[in-house]
Image (spheres, coloured by chain):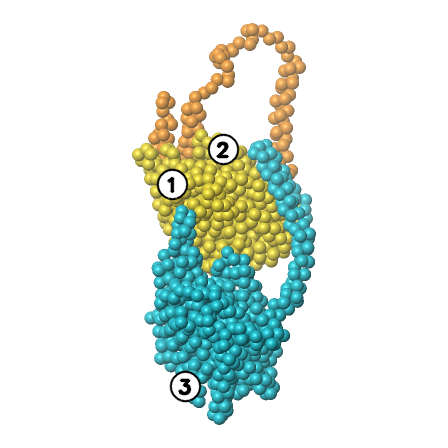
Chain colours: A cyan, B orange, C yellow
Amino acid sequence: MPFLPLIPLLPLAGALACGLLHLQVLRARRHHADARPAEGLIGTIATLAVAAAFALSLERFFALAGSSGERVLTWRATDVWIPTGGPAIPFGFRFDALSSVMCLVITGVGALIHLYSIGYMKGDRGFARFFTYLNLFVAAMLVLVLADSMPVLFIGWEGVGLCSYLLIGFWYEEMKNAEAGQKAFVVNRVGDFGFLLAMFAAAYWTGSFEFTGVNSAVEGGKLATWQTTVLGLLLFVGACGKSAQIPLYVWLPDAMAGPTPVSALIHAATMVTAGVYLVIRTHPIFDVSPIASGVVACTGAATAIFAGSMGLVARDIKKVLAYSTVSQLGFLFLGAGVGAYGASFYHLVTHAFFKALLFLGAGSVILALHHEQDLFKMGGLRRALPGSYRTMWIGAAALAGLPLFSGFFSKDEILAGVLGGRPVFGIPGLNWVLYAVAAATALMTSFYTFRLIYLAFEGEPRGHEHPHPNPTVITLPLVVLAVASVAAAVLGLPFGISHALQHWLEPVIGEPQGHLSHSAEILLLVGSGVIALLGFAIARATYGGGLAKAEARAAARPALYNALSARWWIDELYDATVVRAVRLTSFIAGLIDAFVIDGLVNGAASLAKRGAASARRMADGSTQTYALWFGAGMVVVVASLVLLR
Amino acid sequence: MLSDYAPLLLLLALAAAFVVGNLVISEVLGRPKPGVGKKTVYECGMPIRGTARARFSVHYYLLALLFILFDVEAAFLLPWAAHAEELGKAGLVAMGGFAVVLVVGLLYVMRKKALEWDR
Amino acid sequence: MNLLREELSWITPELCLTLFACVALLVDLFVQKGRESVMVGFFSLMGLLATAFFLYRQYGVTPPAQPVFGCMVVDPFSTLFKLFAVGALAFVVLFTMLSRQTRPDGYGEFYFILLCAGLGAFFLASTYNLLLMYLGLELLSIASYILAGYAKGNRRSGEAAMKYVIFGAVASGVMLYGFTLLYGMTGSIDLTVIGPKLRDQFALDHGTIPISVATGLCLAGFAYKISAAPFHFWTPDVYEGAPTPVTTFLAVASKGAGFAALLRFLQAGFIPDRTLGGPEAMMGYSDKLGTLVAVLAALTMTLGNLAALGQTNLKRMLAYSSIAHAGYVLMGVATMNREGFSSVLFYLVVYYFMNLGAFGVVMYYANTTGDEQIDDLKGLGWRSPLVAITMVAFLVALVGLPPTAGFIGKWFLFTAAVKKGFLWLAVVAGINSAISLFYYFRVARAMWLRPEEEAKYATVHASPAFAALLLVLAVGTVWFGVGFDSLLRYCDYSQNLLR
């Protein structure tokens, strides 16, 4: 009987094993400065650990599919993990429709990325350290999705945050990378704070730390509307941090400082979707509160178009994908905000496939070009890297939403959900506005995606003449993911041909709320297709003819181009407001610290020092002195008892 | 309370007065005439030879200590012996345990050669 | 005869310990020269194991309080302390067998004396009888004097023993005087009789001067035994000079027995039974006594911590730290209520683990290098990681940081003190904990934050047996910091003195 906790335990064991091997390498380096880790062994252990977790998840998935009734497998270590004054905090896992799919995605995509990393990290001094963190990340992410209560989820939540920090700053010798890791960590703390408050508020108001308890309390109408609104908004603050939504998105583009497999696994496929997962997991709260769900939808839409616009002009291949990720995450929140949870989750899954594919493809390009990331210095790689070209083209098509690719269907479902879903803030007209925003974003998406493809693969080489070919461990995951990017479409085809995922999720998210007529669906579908193709055409027209022509066009509209390439001056805005305010506060705090606190501390320290000296002097080793103290003490004790009332 | 102790105090005072009084009286009434003959040891001891601060062998102390130890512990046997019949088997067992401990101690002392004068 | 057997059956642990002490002595006499240490040590361990077994059998079944021979009492409280003593003795015996300081020939009696000291601790923990309490104290003390001076030829050890004897004699004299006064006032040497008689005296309102003098003197005696300020001055000298296993014994078992006797003394004589209620004067006196103990506690922890700050010798530093810890434990005593007493028991068990461990590491270190200086520990973390890691666990527990048992133990002491209204005391203790962080972490810093090249000594391997002992202690230290529920229940159950 496969045991539910084994799913996260396997990668954890892998992390331990790799960690020990890393220690061994460090030990060996004390004698031979350039001792190498046993890469084959480490890579195999790490990959197999995740693959085994995948196999286990699959087995449990089928067991779940075969079960009748409520369709949920649970495991409880203890009902009272932490006793509190109020409700006790349990420790347990919940393997239901939602978490089962998440587990499969995490371990499946994770295993492929592990395999890929063996090739990508080859020869790196921190090879073992890398796989330790990566395995640890998978374990933490699995705990996050399997958790049946908020505190357990929080363990995973913080765990993935930690691993993300460690992996962004993996090459910590460069200040820039270490700073990027720190930025991610600090920004995430803001979100974590929101999540913690939400957790405490939920426990306080509903008397339960468990999701089932909170959800049923909300569904049962035990909470006032203002309470659910507060709860929803706090949860969303947490989700914003993890999933890089406005205003907490700033860390994700910088997070690209980490190795590319990390960007693929953590900052595209899995960790950044944790926020969306959280919203879907606690969806009754958002169902009840129009304000909370409206905020979710509007923030999602704003982030989508905003980040998409920044992706239009980015020159760094990974930055393009990073902005695209932020933008697509905005889509997910938009879908969740209007109640189209099934559509949102469908897009989450397809996005995991094709965005991981695109990142890994980008990684293969970067590797082939000896760590060149500037799109303007690429070009003409189509012949040199045919495997990367073909698979990335499929990934791009899926992301852009070209008809018949998985992204086409999943994005279309979100768009349909926006129109057919519940009115945002209770105002039906707003849905149309959001639809327009989403459609515009889709157009941008299609444009910048194919801009990337054209700049990197078409035209003449600009810089690197002799890229070196990629090994099989790198191309194999690309191919698998490319197949998945196409095949994932069957999870949710329109017109009721296949609503596999939607039906599967119904025990968790309930019946779909919105319903459009078939004709409207067709209209939307055609619309989506046209938008995607239009973007493709514009990109082709702009960049198909070479870089020089494209730059001339950009020069014709300097204001817009500058604004875009300066990322709408958002970092500057943050610098001028938030950062400056923080600096000022920290300056004042520094003064207080230097004069008041340090004064107190130093004073206390010197007091302690002087006290210590005299305390030591008292014990000078002389028996007479001791006897004197003894006698005096006795007299004082007796006298105080006799004299004091 | 304290008055209960009055006879005791009186007795103490009388005893002290007796000693001090006799000394004072003999000092006042007697006329001391010391001489060589008077200073010699007379019928109650040996003439002093050597210094009084001579060192004794450490064995002497060891032996003395052991003597006191066993002497005092053996004294516990007497009350039991006097009431042996009333105390019956229980008393026998208890005293037996006591004796065993003593014997262990004795064995230890012997084995450590603490009882041998010449080593 | 049946009655005798019945009563004897209640003191099987004591009988067993006595028997094995005798056996140990005889084995030492007849075993081949040069093998005493191992053989006698082995028999002592067997005896402790057997004793522990009998104690364990007594634990669940004892009635609330079973009087034995009219002078002893067997109750969960005493059984817990006896188990505590047996455990400590077992570790001390093992340490001794593994230590070089005590290994030279002719050291077989060492174990005998150790077991006798344990017997003294047993009596101290399970009697209401002042005379037996005094006898137990003397048995424990006299054995301790000999043990402290056991490293013959080592001048520090001799000095330690001498100082210990002198102060021990004074303290026991003072305490005996206190006992005598109590006897004179009440005509009984049984605390269970003395308590009600004192209550009557309080009710008659004759004034409390004789009672105050008597309790003050007794308190001074107990304070000496648990090394509370200002009666603690012998502690650093003795702890530093004595062989390390002996120091461990003094710091853990002896101190624990002292606390056991103190708790019993206060409970039986001076804490009014809440169900019966007491005269107002007695209530007031009980509170006054508590406040005095609180002041002693504050003084003890402050002096101990401050003096520990500047120490360079690891053993002496730990001696001062053990004084400071006596101060923390006194916080629980000062509350004079059930919760406080429970927290005392809990903290003593915790203290047992972390102090045995810390002293064990010192012994290991001194054994392999002959050095006890803190600064010379540098680089140990890289050379002997296992020992250094366990040491960090003990240090963290001694500071009182989570997730170790030290944190939970302090937490209970602090809450008990605050609930009783000794907020100031909790603040003082908090400041003291902060101070202690400094000197404990100096050790950790020396071990880990210095490069390996600076290490003074080459790799020193812990023998597997020794490593296992340290590991057991470290696991206990951490385990009770996380899964403390069962231990807390045991301590609360054993705290049968106050309801």
Chain ID at mark 2: C
Q: Chain of mark 3?
A: A
Q: CA distance from mark 2 to mark 3?
A: 88 Å
Distance in Å between CA atoms under marks 1 and 3? 76 Å
Residue C381 place in picture, x, y as percent: 46, 47
Q: Which mark is residue A498?
A: 3
Which residue is located at x 54 percent, y 63 percent?
A180
Mark 1 touches mark 2? (CB < 8 Å): no
Q: Is residue B14 left or right of residue A206?
A: right
Amino acid under disc 3: Ser
| Residue that numbered label 2 is attached to | C156
Between C126 and A427, which is closer to the camera in this rendering? Answer: A427
Q: CA distance from mark 1 to mark 2?
A: 22 Å
Dot 1: within a 10 Å radius of its alpha carbon, few (fewer than 14), some, or many (20 or more) residues? many
Q: Are marks 2 and 3 on the same chain?
A: no
How far across and how far down the image is residue A575, in percent? Answer: 63, 65
Asked whether the residues under marks 1 and 3 belong to the same chain, the reply is no
Name the residue nearer the viewer: C251 or A41.
A41
The type of residue carrying mark 2 is: Arg
Chain at numbered mark 1: C
Look at 49% across and 63% down and name the residue there: A258
